[in-house]
Amino acid sequence: MAGINKVILVGHLGMDPEVRTTESGVKVTRLRLATTEAYKDKSGERKEITEWHTVICWRNLADIAEKYLLKGKLIYVEGKLRTRSWEDNAGAKRYATEVVADNFIMLGAKSDGSIAPMPTAEPVATPVQTTTEKVENGNELPPFLTQEEDDLPF
């Protein structure tokens, strides 16, 4: 079975987008996103825990982030976790875990009109295979995908 690597975050931007361009001309944007969880401790005092996330946007999504996102904006982000490693100047191995964004949506109050509405970066829809089709290699679908509605055990 294939694994699932999906992250969904809703939080506020802690800084304006940091935009760079790779040597091959591909645009990449780095965002710092704060998510805050509130709870009450045993004494009834309200406590908050803030977690900071690094979000990376590539290509067209990086363009949209650069144009429309600002520090303090509330956004919804969908993506996947990626961990990269490198050696620092002292030769020590360093690691960073980041969210590579597939999509984001601006939330919260609308702007004062000085910025045009942001187009949503829609994920690409993949066609769903019906139960009467065969998989590309010619094999039939597994039995649990081909059962008729009356055959379902519930």
Image (spheres, rainbow, N blue to C red):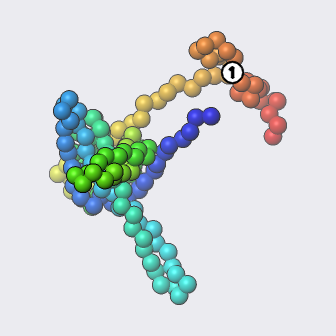
Residue at 20% x, 29% y is 24
Query: What kind of element bears circle 1?
Result: loop
Q: Is residue 83 left or right of residue 126?
A: left
Can residue 131 be spotted in the picture? yes
On the image, which quarter does residue 32 sit in? bottom left
**Closest to the observer, 30 or 84:** 84
> Split into 4 quadrants, where in the image is the N terminus?
top right
On the image, which quarter does residue 79 sit in? top left
Residue at 51% x, 79% y is 40
Residue 73 versus residue 47 in the image, above or below: above
Q: Find residue 111 and report its horizontal and vertical position in percent.
A: 24, 55
Residue at 42% x, 74% y is 48
Residue 69 versus residue 125 in the image, above or below: below
Q: Find residue 76 and report its horizontal and vertical position in percent.
A: 39, 51
Q: Which residue is mark 1?
A: 141
Q: Find residue 130 and report its horizontal and vertical position in percent.
A: 63, 22
